[in-house]
């Protein structure tokens, strides 16, 4: 059994809406969700590390996205 905060009826409506979307609309929606996620992650990182430069914040975003562990010390 999966855990969801969406009711079955709402889920069915959402699935139907997505099915009716064109491939371009689906791609646009996915890209918008991806951008929103990156912006939320950047905001969280900045709030946790206000002393970091923009470069350091973006580097941490990449690390969190692609690497399971912190990078070794001594790397730029």
Image (spheres, helix red, strand yellow):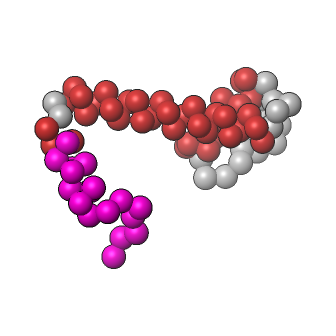
Q: Taking 66 as reference, is 8 above or below it?
A: below
Q: Which residue is at 68% across, 40% downward?
A: 44
Placement of the N terminus among the 4 image quadrants: bottom left
Left or right of residue 64: residue 19: left
The one of 34 and 13 positioned closer to us in this rendering: 13
In the rendered image, is residue 59 in sight? Answer: no
Left or right of residue 18: residue 70: right
Image quadrant assignment for residue 62 = top right
Check residue 14 for magenta coloring: yes
Q: Which residue is at 26% across, 64% downward?
A: 8
Q: Which residue is at 27% across, 55% downward?
A: 10
The one of 60 and 24 positioned closer to us in this rendering: 24
Q: Which residue is at 59% across, 37% downward?
A: 40
Left or right of residue 59: residue 38: left
In the rendered image, is residue 1 in sight? Answer: yes
In the image as oriented, which residue stretches furthest toward the bottom?
A: 1
Check residue 15 for magenta coloring: yes
State which region is magenta.
1-17
Image coordinates of residue 37 in percent, x first then y, are 51, 38
Left or right of residue 65: residue 10: left
In the image as oriented, which residue stretches furthest toward the top?
A: 54
Image coordinates of residue 76 in percent, x first then y, are 77, 29
Image quadrant assignment for residue 32 = top left
What is the total number of numbered labels drawn onto the structure image? 0
In the image as oriented, which residue stretches furthest toward the right?
A: 51
């Amino acid at each position: 059994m999966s855990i969801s905060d969406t009711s079955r009826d709402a889920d069915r409506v959402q699935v139907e809406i997505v099915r009716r979307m064109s491939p371009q609309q689906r791609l646009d929606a996915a890209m918008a969700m991806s951008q929103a996620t990156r912006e939320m992650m950047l905001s969280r990182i900045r709030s946790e590390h206000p002393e970091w430069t923009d470069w350091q914040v973006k580097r941490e975003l990449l690390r969190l996205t692609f690497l399971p562990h912190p990078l070794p010390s001594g790397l730029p």
